[in-house]
Amino acid sequence: MSDQPDQQTKKPFLYVVVCAAGVAGDVGKLITAAQEANWDVGVVATPQGLGFIDAAAVEARTGFPIRSAWRSPGDPRPLPPADAIAVAPGTFNTINKWAAGISDTLALGILCEAYGFGIPTAVLPCLNSAQAAHPAYRLSLDRLREMGVLIGSYEPREPEAGGGADHFRWEEALELLTPKVSATA
């Protein structure tokens, strides 16, 4: 018998990048759905997004620390490499910076590198209609699509209408990513 782990039983690893949006507190819905679909999950939060989630509950559910800041050289990597990435919720700020190649946070650094590594990535936008009307947003979505990023179907809400938690389809991230990851397995 070999001492090597059975690669057939290794679960794919999903990074969930959480941005600062009102629905972010419900990220457990995506984590649970992914785990039920046989994924292991780690969370990377933008610095502002970290304040929108229950970090202790997320870490207990995933079994991994939430990443939000760069690690020091020589420190161990707290998460395994990603097989896929779901940006949920994806904010106006993160989407535009990511498309422009700005890597000023750990989350954006991971997203910018994902393209070069060929990691399947999906984003579930979460923003209001006034933000979505800005020309940079549509250009950013076009750029991300050109990069192979899968874009969710979320419709922007009216400004000041609340977070839209009732209409945010967390499971759509898995619907978008599963065929891509299955095709590369």
Image (tube, helix red, strand yellow):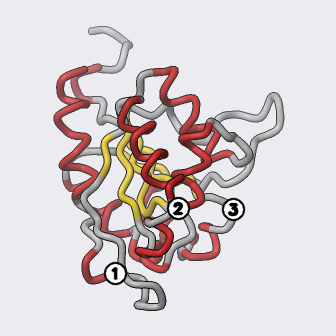
| Residue 165 circle label | 1
Q: Earlier in the sequence, mark 3 or mark 1?
A: 3
Q: Earlier in the sequence, mark 3 or mark 2?
A: 3
Q: Whole-Å distance between the Cαs marked 3 and 2?
A: 15 Å
| Residue 174 circle label | none
Report if residue 64 is visible in the image.
Answer: no
Kind of element beneath mark 1: helix
Q: Residue furthest top?
A: 2
Q: Tag 2: residue type?
A: Phe
Disc 2 target residue: 92
The residue shown at (35%, 72%) is 156
The residue shown at (69%, 40%) is 103
Mark 1, other Cα within 10 Å: few <14 / some 14–19 / many ≥20 = some
Q: Residue furthest right?
A: 73
Disc 3 target residue: 47
Rendered-image quadrant of the C terminus: top left
Q: Tag 3: residue type?
A: Pro
CB within 8 Å, label 3 to label 1? no
x then y, percent, for residue 57: 49, 73
The residue shown at (64%, 75%) is 51
Q: How many marks?
A: 3
Q: Residue furthest bottom?
A: 161
Q: Whole-Å distance between the Cαs marked 1 and 2?
A: 17 Å
x then y, percent, for residue 110: 58, 38
